[in-house]
Amino acid sequence: MSSLAGMAALGSANVRAARPEQAPRRRLAVVLGGGSARAFAHIGVIKALEAAGVKPDLIVGCSAGSLVGAFWAAGYSGRDMEALAYDVQDSAIIDSIAPTASGRRGLLSGQSLESFVNKGVRGRSMTGLMAPLITVATQFPSGQLQEFKTGDVGFAVRASCCIPGIFLPAERDDQEYLDGGLVSPIPVRTARANGATLVVAVDVGAEDPSAYRQRATGGMYELILRSFEIMGKSLREFECKQADVLIRPDVGRISSTDFSSRKALIEAGFKAGARLAPVILAR
């Protein structure tokens, strides 16, 4: 009996030794691109990823995507952010500048947005969040990409969201910053440069030619946003091709300036995220 037991144990050991080692888990980054009002779709994507058990090791955000990313990194669930999206008032993040201001370079200061974010994350710094967060902005006037990984969360989001002509440039330590979408609307390269081995990009900048006529009749804000979309199209496509998984919610029929379509945008994001969550888990 003892020899049989010994042979069985040896055979079991050989079987274990023959099994290939389990591949190491890949480091997952979720990249949330810019898109102004369409960024509400990011919330739906997050809800779908959470429902599937997908948890990022790194969150990278640009422009409005950095706003959603900051709250996600701070521990807000997709449902938490959805409730916040429905409840938040425009006055909480919009702070107009007096029309008579000398040398005015924008319509909004951005300070209210910064304060809103810092209040939401309870005053924590970038390194004090529950998940690593990187936001991207554009240094002005050099045009260099700026990554924010440490420091004040509200300022990092504000800098990333500074649409030229709408927001005043965000300024700190004698350096001004503009919207990250000028140089990297979907910062996949930033995610890879910071150690991500599996990159999921969420692109909410979809095109819908049928909406062009409606957008052409808008005011200055619509004009600037559409100009941004045109300028960033090639960059967006280039960065999307470098992602391992691309989530592209069907939001083309909704203008990037339509902040009243929050529910529809969140639903579109959820559908797109649910469709691709199994692919992310498999990879």
Image (tube, grey):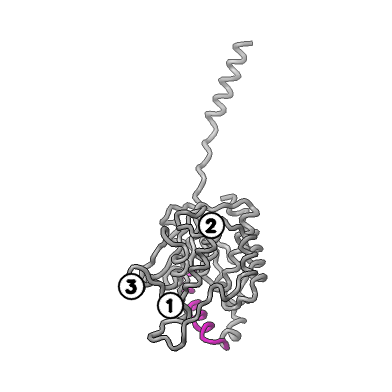
Q: Is 76 left or right of 162, judged from the image as shown? A: right
Q: Residue at x 52, y 53 (%)?
A: 130
| Residue that mark 2 sits on | 74
Q: Secondary structure at mark 1?
A: loop
Amino acid marked by disc 3: Ser
| Residue that mark 1 sits on | 168
Q: Residues within 10 Å of mark 1 (few under 14, many from 20)?
A: many
Q: Is residue 91 above or below residue 15?
A: below
The stretch of residues the image draws in magenta is 217-236
Q: Nearer the viewer, mark 1 or mark 3?
A: 1
Q: Is residue 252 above or below residue 83?
A: below
Q: Secondary structure at mark 2?
A: loop
| Residue that mark 3 sits on | 142
Q: Secondary structure at mark 3?
A: loop
Q: Residue at x 44, y 88 (%)?
A: 100
Determine contact: label 1, label 2, CB under 8 Å: no
Distance Cα–Cα, label 3 vs label 2: 31 Å
Amino acid marked by disc 1: Leu
Q: Is residue 112 above or below residue 3?
A: below
Q: Residue at x 60, y 73 (%)?
A: 89
Distance Cα–Cα, label 1 vs label 3: 17 Å
Q: Residues within 10 Å of mark 3 (few under 14, many from 20)?
A: few
Residue 215 in sight here:
yes
Q: What secondary structure prevails in the magenta region?
A: helix
Within the image, what quadrant is residue 37 found in?
bottom right
